[in-house]
Image (cartoon, helix red, strand yellow):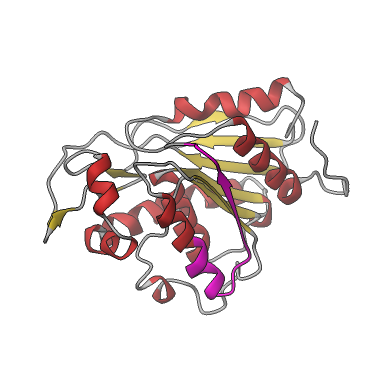
Amino acid sequence: MPGAAALVVPAVKKHTATVIFAHGLGDSGAGWMPLAQNWRRRGKFEEVAFIFPNAPQIPITVVRVTPKDIPFCLTNLSLIGCTEFRNENARLTTFNDLQNAHDEAGILKSRDYFNALIKQETEKGIPSSRIVVGGFSQGGAIAVFTGLTSPVQLGGFFGLSAYLLMHNKIKDFVPTDNPNKTTPVFMGHGDADPTVRYEWGQMTAKVLQGMGWAVDFRTYKGLEHSADPEEIDDLEAYLVERLSPPGDTVASKA
């Protein structure tokens, strides 16, 4: 079940494309709305609607994985800190360890919610190939998973400070016809992230590239668990490339 209704920044011109952006732990959709509002002020993406889902508030439980606690479980749009996000736990947790803490049923429910949002947009007449899904941290993780396993071709998918969910069985969830096998993926990660480790992002890109995806993985020196202007500029360039208005072959940044 989703939390509060998703927040929407509507297109200001004819609506031809949509970006769905999911937040991370302890945040809400409102936390990322300034991203779209800034682009609005600059006259960017005027034909694009932005949807910012809200994850539900749920009780926190504890998941123990010997020999250490893995501080993640997943319900709906956000991975919830089962003990809390603790930098020490993240430092000790390997990319492979993460698989032991993933709630498969919760991940699939989250993916289904994303797919329902995509379907709502296509029912409005927006081609799935002009829909991009993405997010930050846990929201980025479920967005990437959704993109990889989507039954329809998407315009793109991205994760900021994110990582791959269920990488040990992701191939089982990719559709046989793999409609997004040529869809470019954007990932950005700070190399000083103490929460979602930089190495997890690197391994995600490596796994996806090994499966044949074109992944543009960008590193931001000294950036912790956050986003910075350079990363947002890179994301903007990715969205310009993927969602330029029909007939517009020029992709440029202001």
Residue 163 or 3: which is nearer the viewer? 163
Left or right: where 38 falls relative to 190: right
Location of residue 12 in the rendering, given as x and y in whole percent from the top left corner:
72, 27
Q: Nearer the viewer, residue 219 or 134?
A: 219
Q: Position of residue 207 (x, y in %)?
A: 48, 69
- Seen in the image, is 196 located left or right of residue 21? left
Is residue 65 among the parts visible in the rendering? no
The span picked out in magenta is: 205-223
Residue 100 found in image quarter: bottom left
Name the residue: 59% across, 68% down.
Answer: 213
Q: Is residue 22 left or right of residue 236?
A: left
Magenta stretch: residue 19 in it?
no
Residue situated furthest bottom in the rendering: 176
Q: Outermost residue, top direction? A: 41
Image quadrant where one finds the N terminus: top left
Counting labels gives 0
Q: Looking at the image, which is closer to me, 108 or 72?
A: 72
The C terminus appears in which quarter of the rendering?
Answer: top right
Where's residue 65, x and y in %?
14, 59
Name the residue at 67% across, 57% down: 129
Residue 95 visible in the shown view: yes
**Is 45 situated above or below 176?**
above
Residue 211 falls within the magenta-colored stretch: yes
Residue 101 point in image, percent of width and height: 23, 58
Instruction: Determine whether 139 is above or below 215 in the image.
Output: above
The residue that appears at 46% across and 45% down in the rendered structure is: 161
